[in-house]
Amino acid sequence: MGQITVEHDCGGIRGLKVVMPAVHGDDRGYFMETYQARDFAEAGIDCTFVQDNQSSSRRGVLRGLHFQINYPQAKLVRVVKGEVFDVAVDLRPGSETFGKWFGIVLTAENKKQFFIPENFAHGFLVLSDEAEFCYKVTDFWHPNDEAGLKWDDPEIGIEWPLQEGVELTLSDKDQKWEGITAYRKERCNG
């Protein structure tokens, strides 16, 4: 692998990967390849990305935990401005780590990227005043196929780094998702 290093042990959840691109800097600034198909394939991330997305959010915004049911998306995410706590929850049927989560701080400064395979719920919490979040996905957004999990489901137990004095901001739909028990009953036949 030429331009990236990859961490494969993400809380013991198979398939998740933290990617660190090689950063070439000098007195002018820096250069890095944020995605190169050969290097990523050698690292076990051999998928076709079909869409790039970018969002901007302010401190305390929590987006997630989102997934698509019939058109699952693998994602490669990174932060180009600010800082977020990024989370993936394993929803793969039959997975030995079903319902387990892994979180990582992504910042514009650390330049880490997080690869999330298909059949994971995904979300993030903005820790800086502002954050710009970029992600590549392997399938298109299907509005009638989207679903989610409750961000603070005690059964999942995500340890969100909530900041004292900062009020959380969630969308209306993100406030209404159910927990993983309801998901398991509906999707995994109990």
Image (spheres, rainbow, N blue to C red):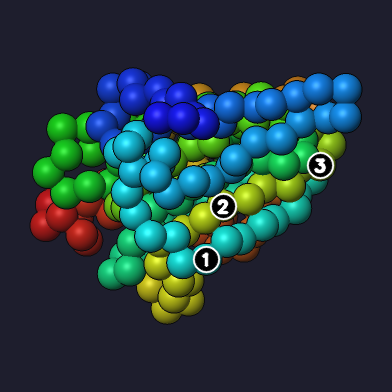
Q: Is residue 180 above or below residue 176?
A: above
Earlier along the polypeptide chain: callout 2 or callout 1? 1
The residue indicated by pointer 3 is: 130
Q: Could you tell me residue 164's position as x and y percent?
A: 75, 23
Q: Could you tell me residue 22's position as x and y percent?
A: 58, 27
Choose mark 2 or mark 3, whichever is in front: 2
Tell me if 88 is positioned left or right of 160 in this view.
left
The residue positioned 25% from the left and 32% from the top of the image is 14
The residue indicated by pointer 1 is: 51
The residue indicated by pointer 2 is: 135
Tell me if 93 is positioned left or right of 73 in this view.
left
Q: Residues within 10 Å of mark 1 (few under 14, many from 20)?
A: few
| Nearest to the observer: residue 60 or residue 119 | 119
Distance from Cα at disc 1 to Cα at disc 3: 23 Å
Tell me if 52 is positioned left or right of 71 in this view.
right
* Dots 2, 3 in contact, CB < 8 A: no
**Three-letter amino acid code at the position of disc 2:** Tyr
